Image (spheres, rainbow, N blue to C red):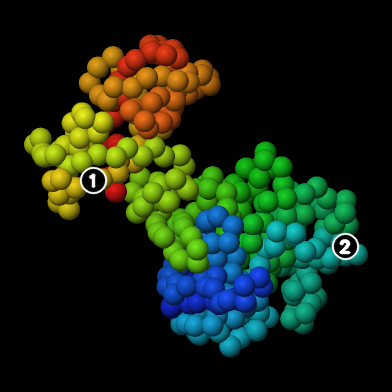
Amino acid sequence: MDKVKKGVRLEHISKIYQDPKTGKDFYAVKDTSLTIEPGSFVTLLGPSGCGKTTTLRMIAGFESPDEGEIYLGDEAINALTPNKRDTAMVFQSYALLPHYNVFDNVAYGLKLRKVPKDEIRERVMHILDLVELTGMEGRMTNQLSGGQQQRVALARALVIEPSVLLFDEPLSNLDAKLRVSMRTEIRRIQQEVGITAIYVTHDQSEAMALSDNIIIMKNGVVEQMGSPQEIYYHPVNEFVADFIGEANFLKGVMSGHNGTHALLTIEGHEMPIAGRDDLKEGETYTVVLRPESGHLADQGGLPCKVIVSCFMGSYQNYHVMVGDTLVKLAEHNPKNKRIYQVGEACQLVFDPEEVHVL
């Protein structure tokens, strides 16, 4: 594709629905402003009902915002119908035409646009090669596996050369192993083509594997937008920390400083954490500890008691109680480490730089 890459911009977008039970209005999406850079892969992530699919449908033109404006590049597109927008959607259900073969399914959008036959053949064969379906153009869609059908749906969306490709949970009908391979393929194709992609999912591992940036939504509001690394290591609140990956939360009171480290008193024990200018003595904070960021030792940390100890091959899975707080740990490469057994008293140790404070 030689087209100029376009991004998407949402300015104070809201969508209001009426609750059928109560008759009251509610915001499915509330005052959302986003900038999606040209050529990037961005995932809308969140639990059911968070507003992610409604946001995608408003970008596609299947829903109209009640407030705010949507831009594709520099063009305001609120007034444009879906077929007039420079976008294409890959659906959860594939939405393939059952009486057409693979070639005709992929060519359908080009025929509607009255593209010349020779150009249609050239573009369709090029896209089928890109999605690794060369030689299958004569097959009917009911002769294809789920993964192959998804590739046809992707090819059909790509062949019209949209500026923005939209994905509505496209892998949810595939088995777990195929989902992993298909998300790798989707990312490969997106990077090869250089197209802007917006992807909706509730699967955090999909979001982490695919995205340049992740947008976490809750109750119609954007909680955080950032790279997978930013969101994983620097979540803005407990909801984000718990939604991306697994997180332990330890409450502590800021009690002073030790050189460049702040000191938090957790369960009566002072623990060093990375110093920050906004931490105030006497205030209560939450330490976000990822399972891989802590380990067990005989001393040097927070007293705890082991309640689960399971060998998982590449790591030892521990559940320990720190006071009344359950902490889950994944100690990697346990082969030459001491293994703590259920009922043992030990100490939870973590690197001050490896935790995040809320």
Residue 304 occupies which quadrant of the picture? Answer: top left
Within 10 angstroms of label 1, few (less than 14), some, or many (20 or more) residues?
Answer: some
Residue 49 in the image, given as x and y percentages of width and height? 58, 61
Q: Is residue 234 above or below residue 36?
A: above
Which residue does the numbered mark 1 point to in the structure image?
284
Residue appearing at x 51%, y 18% in the figure: 311
**Which of marks 1 and 2 precedes in the sequence?**
2
- Front residue of 123/31: it is 31
Asked which secondary structure carries label 2, the reply is loop
- Front residue of 129/164: it is 164
Q: Is residue 120 above or below residue 133?
A: below
Which residue does the numbered mark 2 point to in the structure image?
98
Residue at the bottom extreme, as displayed:
79
Residue 344 occupies which quadrant of the picture? Answer: top left
Residue 306, numbered label: none
- Is any atom of residue 230 visible in this view? no
The three-letter amino acid code for the residue at tag 1 is Thr
Task: Please state, as top left, top right, bottom left or bottom right, where the N terminus lies in the image.
Answer: bottom right
On the picture, is 286 further left or further right than 207? Answer: left
Residue appearing at x 67%, y 40% in the figure: 176
Asked which secondary structure carries label 1, the reply is strand
Within 10 angstroms of label 2, few (less than 14), some, or many (20 or more) residues?
Answer: few
